[in-house]
Image: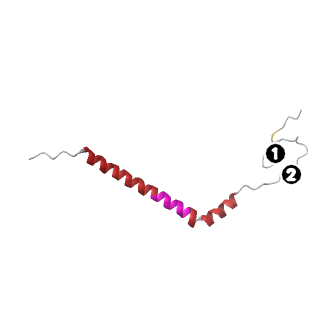
Amino acid sequence: MAAPAPVDWRVTLRQRVAIVAVTTAAWVGCIEARLVHLQIFKRADLVARAERQQMRTQPVPPKYDLPPGSIVYRNLAEAVRAIVK
């Protein structure tokens, strides 16, 4: 029985590089397709969601027994008292 012919390392390297290139191109294509889907087809939904999620300002009624600059919790309990000199 004859020994198999040796495989040239250049051919193996070229095949592996081609496989990596094709896999990378497919991965990039999937990411680009997802971005196009989000930016073109889902834009209106995402804009509406972003507008709902924007921070709203909530006025805090003044509490005259606290010095200016005091930090309060949401329920207006005092968190940190400002030191006024």
Is 58 one of the magenta-colored residues? no
The verdict on residue 35 being magenta is: yes
Q: Which of the pair 79/28 is nearer the observer?
A: 28
Q: Nearer the viewer, residue 45 or 74?
A: 45
Which residue appears at 34% of the width and 49% of the height? 17
Which mark identifies residue 12?
none
Is residue 83 or residue 19 the one in the foreground? 19
- Name which residue type carries label 1: Ala
Which residue is pictured at 34% across the width and 52% down the height?
Answer: 18
At a point 83% along the width and 41% down the height, the residue shown is 70
Tell me which label, 1 or 2, sits earlier in the chain. 2
Kind of element beneath mark 2: loop
List x then y, in percent, for residue 61: 86, 51
When the figure is inspected, residue 34 is found, relative to residue 68, above or below; the finding is: below
Q: Quadrant of residue 69?
A: top right
Q: Residue at label 2?
A: 61
Asked which quadrant contains residue 77, the reply is top right
Choose top left, top right, bottom left or bottom right for residue 26: bottom left
Furthest residue in direction left, as rendered: 1
| Mark count | 2
In the rendering, at what x and y percent does residue 32 appear? 49, 59
Residue 49 percent across, percent down from the top left: 65, 62
Identify the amino acid type marked 2: Pro
Q: Position of residue 51 (x, y in %)?
A: 69, 61
Horizontally, residue 33 falls left or right of residue 53, namely left
Q: Residues within 10 Å of mark 2 (few under 14, many from 20)?
A: few
Secondary structure under badge 1? loop
Q: Quadrant of the C terminus?
A: top right
The image's mark for residue 77 is: 1
Q: Which segment is the magenta one?
A: 29-38
